[in-house]
Amino acid sequence: MTKCKHQERHVDHASEDASRRINRPLDEARDRMDAIGPQTPVDRRLALNAKASDLLSGVWSLPPTQYLVFRPGVGLADADPASTPGFDGTKADGERFIAVSADEISRYQTLLYANGSRGSKRRLLVVLQGMDASGKGGIVRHIFTQGNPMGIRYKGFGKPTDEELSHDFLWRVRRELPEPGWIGVFDRSHYEDIVMPHVYGTYPESVWCPRYDLVNEFESQLVADGCSIIKIFLVSSRDAQRRHFLGRLDDPSKHWKFDMSDLDARDRWDDYMAAWQEVFERTSTPAAPWYLVPADRRWYSRAVVSELLRDALERMNLSWPPLDVDPDEARRRLLA
């Protein structure tokens, strides 16, 4: 056996071992979720959910909430866009994790929505940022498939309108915040109002630089008011962006996605990276940290988002709201 074949077999065995390590807890998590039925007592349901969540977390050798969170002194240049940190399995393993995790996320989202309908202020905001063709649109679709669209609201932020420019830069963002019990998804966000003038000089530094502190105060107030925040930057490579751009040019059904301004931004890639690095340094806080998610492998970035979603919802530690009517009276009227 040649050295090359020996190494190939070793890699295959390692991949098979990783898949077994991943699928074992996925099987167990599925069993816990399947054990939940209409007659399952509330306490038992919550316990089964918690156990299933623990098993899903165990799929990761390094939790994304720890490994992918931004740390001062660590920059975008240090991230490998094609890597899959914390997940040792294959694409198929990642897609199975997403499928199993979706049911758990859906249960927690229903719990969040139920509490919101009874006066709880708990809600969740997901902020998605990244260069063009980094996969933000795919992540948005992915989030909607993970939960019930009835409790998820999407907002894509583009160039400010004349009306929006007549107000402070956070005005349009405040109008789109999730209601109690809801999940809000921002495709781009208030951070564009810092990065764009930073890169293009459309406003002097005296205008956009103070926005760092305003954003930190804004997000701190949101968290204090019951809104959890997940801020995700999809780290893509220039090579991957080129492939996606060429794919859009070659596919008539994707021509609408392409604009020459995308190439203008690509030409200033390094300027964007420097501007985003400063954003992370100035606005990644304990209350609202940034997560830098490698995005060249789309299945991996979607698996990470699933884990961040489920973890954030579980950490809310919600219980099912009690019945606030007289059950005997309700039954009497139903049976009359």
Image (cartoon, rainbow, N blue to C red):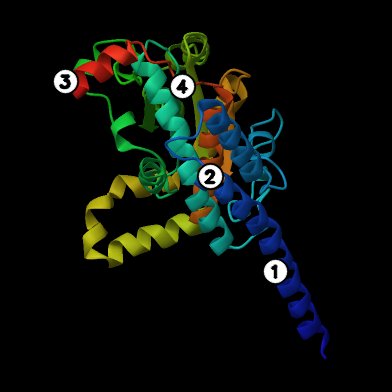
As rendered, which of 122 and 117 lies closer to the eye? Answer: 117
| Quarter where residue 75 is shown | top right
| Quarter where residue 242 is shown | bottom left
Q: Which residue is mark 2?
A: 35
How much space separates mark 3 and mark 1, taking CA atoms? Answer: 61 Å
The label shown at residue 16 is: 1
**Amino acid of disc 2:** Ala
- Which tag, 3 or 2, sits closer to the chain's start? 2
As rendered, which of 4 and 16 lies closer to the eye? Answer: 16
Q: Which residue is mark 4?
A: 320
- Which tag, 2 or 1, sits closer to the chain's start? 1
Q: Quadrant of the N terminus?
A: bottom right
Image coordinates of residue 48 in percent, x first then y, are 58, 37
Q: Nearer the viewer, mark 3 or mark 2?
A: 3
Q: Which residue is mark 3?
A: 336
Look at the picture and state if 289 lies above or below 91.
Answer: above
**Amino acid of disc 3:** Ala
Look at the picture and state if 262 lies above or below 287.
Answer: below
Identify the residue at image location x=27%, y=65%.
Answer: 251
How much space separates mark 4 and mark 1, taking CA atoms? Answer: 40 Å
- Which tag, 3 or 4, sits closer to the chain's start? 4
What element does badge 2 sit on?
A: loop
What element does badge 1 sit on?
A: helix
How much space separates mark 2 and mark 4, taking CA atoms? Answer: 18 Å
- Say few, some or many: other residues with alpha carbon within 10 Å of mark 3 (under 14 / 14 to 19 / 20 or more): few
- Which tag, 3 or 1, sits closer to the chain's start? 1
How much space separates mark 2 and mark 1, taking CA atoms? Answer: 28 Å
